[in-house]
Amino acid sequence: MSKDKLGIADYPLAERRPELVRGRRGKGLAELTLDEVLSGAVEMEDLRITPEALLQQADIARDANRATLAGNFERASEMADLPQDFIMEVYELLRPGRAPDKGALEAAAARLRDEYGAERLAQFVEEAGQVYERRGLFTFRF
């Protein structure tokens, strides 16, 4: 959950609570102007979503009785700071028929947990390993 508990009355944040929307370098929406872009004061990091913003969206989704969506936002908040190459590595393992066995997914989950503190993502990958094992999805199928 985000520090400042939000609800459906706060959605959309950019309109209802713009003071809470911040980029990775701390710039607020009011600072993201065309003049600032043209002057070079706005960088791509200012436009990337933050883990905090995703947790705010999770709060709103949960308040709207959309628990599954809230969980997706919470996992996404953990992904926001992961290296792209590692995200693609795990993505490839999660494609049916790509991981050789459950151990490969368990190893990816351990790395998510131990190196990146991504507990929700680790649980998701472990759960996928259990499902893939039960359904026989570790065999290369294509």
Image: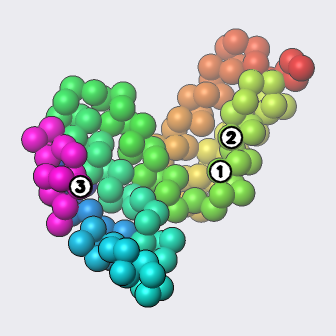
Tag 2 secondary structure: helix
Q: How far apart are marks 3 and 1 (CA)?
A: 28 Å
Bin the neighbour count of mark 1 within 10 Å (Cα to Cα): few under 14, some 14-19, many 20 and up: some
Identify which residue, 121 or 39, lies in the foreground.
39
Bin the neighbour count of mark 2 within 10 Å (Cα to Cα): few under 14, some 14-19, many 20 and up: few
Q: Distance between the residues labelled 3 and 2?
A: 31 Å
Is residue 89 visible to us here?
A: yes
Identify the residue at image location x=36%, y=32%.
69
Mark 1 near mark 2, Cβ–Cβ under 8 Å? yes
Side of 19 where 78 appears, left or right? right
Magenta segment main secondary structure = helix
Question: Over which residues does the magenta segment extend?
Answer: 7-19
Tag 3 secondary structure: helix
Q: Position of residue 43 (x, y in %)?
A: 48, 77
User: Where does label 3 land, which residue?
Assistant: 14
Residue 125 quadrant: top right
Side of 1 where 24 appears, left or right? right
Q: How far apart are marks 1 and 2 (CA)?
A: 6 Å
User: Taking 29 as reference, is 134 above or below it?
Assistant: above
Quadrant (top left/top right/bottom left/bottom right) for the C terminus: top right
Residue 62 quadrant: top left
Mark 3 or mark 1, earlier in chain: 3
User: Where does label 2 land, which residue?
Assistant: 91
Q: Is residue 84 magenta?
A: no
User: Where does label 1 land, which residue?
Assistant: 87
Q: Where is residue 100 in the image (x, y as percent from the top left)?
A: 84, 31
Indicate the amino acid at tag 2: Tyr
Q: Where is residue 77 in the image (x, y as percent from the top left)?
A: 42, 52
Identify the residue at image location x=33%, y=36%.
70
Indicate the amino acid at tag 3: Ala
Residue 136 quadrant: top right
Q: Where is residue 38 in the image (x, y as percent from the top left)?
A: 45, 81
